[in-house]
Structures are given as C-alpha cells and as structure tokens.
Image (cartoon, rainbow, N blue to C red):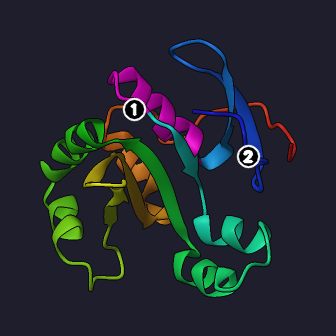
Amino acid sequence: MPDAVTNVHPAARLALPEGGFADVDLKMVPLVQALWAMGLRTAGCCQDLGESSAFTGNEAGRERFGQYYRGQAWLKMPVEDTRIMLARLAEHPRFRERFNRWTRPDAWENYVYLLAGDTDVQLSAWAQIHFPNDQLDEVTAILGGPASTNISVRSRC
C-alpha cells in the first residue's frame, strides 16, 4: 500500500509483502495482515472513510461524502483479489446477504470505476470496497486472521 497520504487515524508501520513500508490504520491492521497472508494485495485502506474524508480538505461535497461514509471501513484491492476475498466471505450466510442487499444497514458496497480514454472506456483494475467498520473483527476472523493484535501505535503522520 502506498505511503503517500497522511493518516488521519492512529496507524502502525507495516512491512509490505513486496518490500517497503506503509502506515496502516490500527483497526485495519489485522484485516490487512490476513489478506496479505492469503496472498491478496491491497493498495489502500481506512478504518473510517467518513472521518478521514471530513478531515482531508474542504472541497464542495466533502461534508456530504464524509457523512455518507462515516462508520464505513474502506479497502482498495485489485478486482480479482477482491473477488477471491468476497467469495471466501460469501461462504458465510451473513455475509452473502450483506453483499446482495444494499438497503440493509450492514450491507457492503463494492465499486469498480470506469476509466474513459480518448477512444474507449475501460474498467479500473482496482475495486473500492466499503463496509461497516463494526464488522472488521468478524471479517478478519473469517479470513483466518486474529480479530485484534497488539500493535505499536504510530501517531498521525
């Protein structure tokens, strides 16, 4: 995960599987480590996208965006890795329902953006996954990681 954005939430510095380091929000660390242990890649994450969005910048629409995503965790992963993660979670009936019913308060949202070029439109190689952050421990446990860990805290960067 790139280390290009200042963390809003307390973070831990993790060694990336491919080398280098990234600061990862503390509440996301167990999930990210479980994904990496599965051989899945991540490119970004946030333990509360609404809080982060409200904190970063004052562009028009940020407040509305922040309110909508408050309490939502966010992951950015390659599309195929996202499919693998979601298939594993969908083996559990609670999660299968969360993926299919966006009207549920515990539902997940997954986006793959369209990228317009000069002559065509393509799907992004990256998926954006949003889900209630109170599901982090449950998701991590299902994917085979510990629900929580003792991680040294790194203050805001």
On screen, residue 144 above or below 142: above
Instruction: Point out residue 95 in the picture as x, y percentages from the top left corner.
Output: 22, 60
Task: Say which element carries label 1.
Answer: helix
Q: Nearer the viewer, residue 118 or 68?
A: 118
Task: Tell me the kind of residue under disc 2.
Answer: Val
Where does the C terminus fall, quadrant-wise?
Answer: top right
Corner quadrant of residue 41: top left
Name of the residue lying farthest toward the top: 19
Which circle's residue, 2 or 1, is located before the other in the chain?
2
Q: Which mark is residue 5?
A: 2
Q: Give the farthest residue toward the front.
A: 119
- Residue at the spot 20% in from the left edge and 63% down from the top edge: 94
| Amino acid on which disc 1 is placed | Leu
SS at mark 2?
loop
Please indicate whether residue 13 sits to the left or right of residue 155 in the image.
left
Disc 2 from disc 1: Cα separation: 21 Å
Tag in front: 2 or 1:
2
Residue in the picture at 39% in, 21% down = 37
Q: Quadrant of the N terminus?
A: top right
Q: Give the residue drawn at x 66%, y 45%.
A: 25
Q: Is residue 22 left or right of residue 68?
A: right
Magenta stretch: residue 22 in it? no
Q: Which mark is residue 35?
A: 1
Q: Looking at the rendered structure, which numbered label has been put on residue 54?
A: none
10 Å crowding of disc 1: few (<14), some (14-19), many (20+): many
Q: Horizontal and vertical percent for residue 147?
A: 48, 42
Extent of the magenta region: 28-41
Whether 22 is drawn above or below 61: the answer is above
